[in-house]
Image (tube, helix red, strand yellow):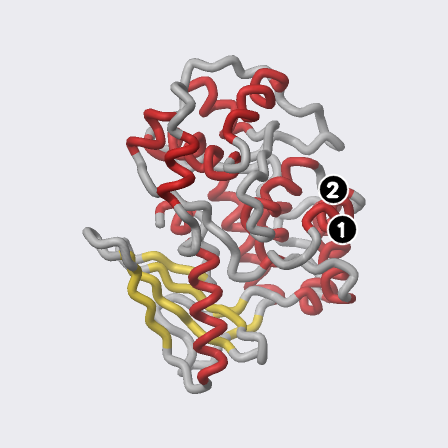
Amino acid sequence: MRFLSDRAIPGVEVFDGGTFRRSIRTRHGRAVVIGLTPHPTRSNVTFEAAIDDPTDLADAVRASRRLLDLDADPVSIDTALSTDPALGPLVRATPGLRLPGAIDGFEVAVRAILGQQISVRAARTLAGRIVTRAGTTLARDEAIEGVTHLFPTPEQLAAAPLEGLGLTRRRVETIHRLAELVASGELVLAEHADRQAIRDALLAVPGIGPWTVAYISMRALGDPDAFPASDLGVREGFHALGLPTTASAITDHAERWRPWRGYAVMHLWNTEALAGEALAGEPPAEPSARPPLA
């Protein structure tokens, strides 16, 4: 919940301290606002939504389970990661830590591009501006408690002028190119698709580098072993654990976490969150801008 609330896009998502609400678009194009409330003592989440069509209900439930990673096996994952003496204390301190997924793969990809080189708060602000400029406004009877918009579709973003929102020209071009690829069907950002083919296609887009691809793999493609080795939060997590922080040392040490390196990243990011800073997932500049952190 902290991870999601720190990144809540104004107009699309809101967290009131107990319930996380957001808008989703079903496969039939209808707007639904869902509410997810983890029980404070039991291992379950209450789902709520106003839905008329049963097919929309199924879509909303599946999307919610992906977002909260409810189909993971945390016991097996924790058992595997706990064998590392360095990471084990973090795992035992926060057992069952999940890897937040995606309501929509395209949305996560856009958010990853926005998050390059800036803080979580700044990326969230930019995303809110994009939603206001290009998203769909919910009807009055659909909007609920601050959730007023749907995130833009690839088609909407491909055609939307994004100048004047605080984005660099290069970032605008990257978002437009990504939107065009997804809108045309050339790129499918979904868990069932070929992950390596998607990674290769993403890396071919100017402005998208290894960090962005790894983040998209973690959240949009459901890859439990995705590992953004150059990530600033990962490096700081290694430092907090007293581990070497050179690029080669990080990559070598992470090998022992396979095939759950994505979950290990969540624990590393959580060291910063527990210290009171929402720095999880902030990348260094992509290689096209400056070298990854040493």
Left or right: 34, with 265 as reference point: left
Residue located 50% across and 29% down the image: 257
Q: Position of residue 273 (x, y in %)?
A: 37, 35
Q: Residue at x 68, y 36 (%)?
A: 210
Identity, as a three-letter code, of the amino acid under mark 2:
Gly
Direction from residue 195 to residue 260 in the image, left or right: left
Which residue is at 68% across, 57% downward?
Answer: 193
274 or 54: nearer the eye?
54
Residue sticking out furthest to the bottom: 52
**What residue did someone put label 2 on?**
207
* Amino acid on which the number 1 mark rests in the picture: Glu
Q: Secondary structure at mark 1?
A: helix
- The quadrant of the picture occupied by the C terminus is top right
- The residues tagged by marks 2 and 1 sit, at their Cα atoms, a distance apart of 8 Å
- Residue pictured at 40% horizontal, 55% vertical: 70
| 13 vs 279: above or below | below
Residue 130 pos. (x, y %): 59, 59
Q: Residues within 10 Å of mark 1 (few under 14, many from 20)?
A: some
Taking depth in this image into account, of 189 and 167 the one nearest to the observer is 189
- Position of residue 91 relative to residue 54, above or below, is above
Q: How many marks?
A: 2
Residue 123: x and y, percent? 54, 46
- Is 72 drawn above or below residue 269 in the view shown? below
Q: Which mark is residue 173?
A: 1
* Pointer 2 local density, CA inside 10 Å: few below 14, some 14–19, many at least 20: many
Left or right, 237 with respect to 218, comes to left
